[in-house]
Image (cartoon, rainbow, N blue to C red):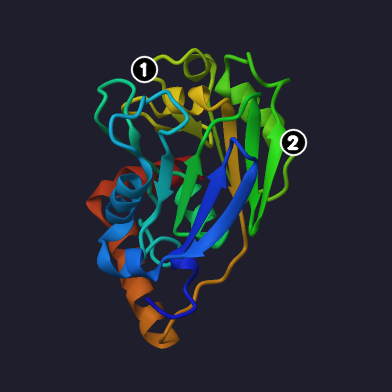
């Protein structure tokens, strides 16, 4: 990891006190492997033993890996939390734009702690975190509708992610998911219920940070080889055929 890589920035958000701060955690990203390794350590640090999965002490940890936003196919965000479904470790992964947005906003991980007394959503635009009133969104059972409303009221079109819950999350269904973009989900072990327990209706993340590269020529060569291997693979053949049929 290069000295000026924003990957080592961890954004901490306290929903109870409505405050946020950033800590440089080179130790995490140099010692632990990928977003899952970092998220596991942060959960160990932030989640008290025997905490209630639906209580304010259960943190939401979102993390990305060192290749995110640098190379093709590295586009997953991992979420760690205590699962309301099992009472044990909750680990869920999501594709779409979420990982790219978090890294582009200048972070390698986000830690959400506490719980709000009233419904809200978080709008993270680079180094600014806004605590938005979500009273008018609370009660909307369609996460699609929630996403559409937020899209029309937040900046960052094209480079943002919108994570949100519907009726299941609000009602603390133990296996509720969190929807991102349109058809992507944190779909395992009840992250949506943890959102709901914190009165957190949605999380918007956007940014435009550029990422440091030590050797641009070597980087371009590796990028191109990965890209070509991906788009010419047999797995991608069905998508090429679909494009040709459309044209």
Q: Nearer the viewer, residue 100 or 9?
A: 9
The residue that appears at 64% across and 18% down in the rendered structure is 138
The quadrant holding residue 226 is bottom left
Q: Is residue 197 above or below residue 48?
A: above
Q: Earlier in the sequence, mark 1 or mark 2?
A: 2
Q: Nearer the viewer, residue 9 or 235?
A: 9
Nearest to the eye among marks 1 and 2: give it: 1
- Residue 78, how many percent across, how many down? 36, 45
Asked whether disc 1 touches disc 2, contact meaning CB atoms under 8 Å apart, the reply is no
The residue that appears at 43% across and 33% down in the rendered structure is 57
Give the secondary structure at mark 2: loop
Is residue 159 in sight in this rendering? no
- Residue 190, how many percent across, how many down? 37, 25
Which residue sits furthest right? 153
Left or right of residue 206: residue 79:
left
Classify 10 Å Cα crowding around label 2: few (below 14), some (14-19), many (20 and above). few
Give the secondary structure at mark 1: loop
Q: Which residue in the structure is indicated by mark 1? A: 174
Q: Which residue in the structure is indicated by mark 2? A: 152
The quadrant holding residue 29 is bottom left
The residue that appears at 49% across and 28% down in the rendered structure is 195
Is residue 178 in sight in this rendering? yes
Q: Nearer the viewer, residue 20 or 72?
A: 20
The residue that appears at 36% across and 17% down in the rendered structure is 174
The quarter of the image holding the N terminus is bottom left
Q: Nearer the viewer, residue 127 or 212?
A: 127
Left or right of residue 40: residue 130:
right
Q: Is residue 101 above or below residue 189?
A: below
């Amino acid at each position: 990891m290069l000295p000026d890589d924003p990957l080592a920035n961890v954004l901490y958000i306290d929903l109870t006190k409505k405050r946020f701060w950033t800590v440089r955690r080179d130790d995490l990203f140099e010692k632990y492997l990928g977003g899952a390794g970092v998220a596991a350590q942060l959960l160990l640090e932030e989640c008290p033993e025997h905490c209630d999965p639906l209580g304010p002490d259960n943190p939401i940890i979102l993390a990305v890996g060192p290749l995110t936003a640098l190379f093709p196919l590295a586009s997953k965000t991992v979420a760690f939390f205590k699962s309301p479904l099992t009472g044990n470790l909750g680990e869920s992964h999501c594709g779409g734009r979420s990982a790219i947005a978090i890294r582009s906003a200048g972070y390698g991980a986000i830690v959400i702690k506490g719980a709000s007394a009233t419904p809200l959503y978080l709008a993270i635009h680079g180094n600014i975190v806004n605590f938005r009133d979500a009273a008018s969104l609370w009660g909307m059972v369609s996460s699609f509708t929630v996403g559409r409303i937020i899209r029309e009221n937040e900046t960052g079109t094209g480079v943002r992610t919108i994570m949100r819950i519907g009726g299941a999350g609000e009602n603390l269904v133990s296996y509720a998911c969190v929807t991102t973009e349109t058809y992507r989900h944190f779909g395992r072990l009840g992250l949506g219920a943890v959102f709901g327990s914190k009165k957190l209706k949605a999380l918007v993340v956007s940014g435009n940070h550029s990422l440091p590269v030590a050797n641009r020529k070597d980087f371009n060569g590796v990028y191109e080889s990965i890209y070509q291997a991906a788009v010419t693979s047999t797995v991608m053949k069905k998508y090429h055929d679909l494009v040709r049929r459309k044209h």
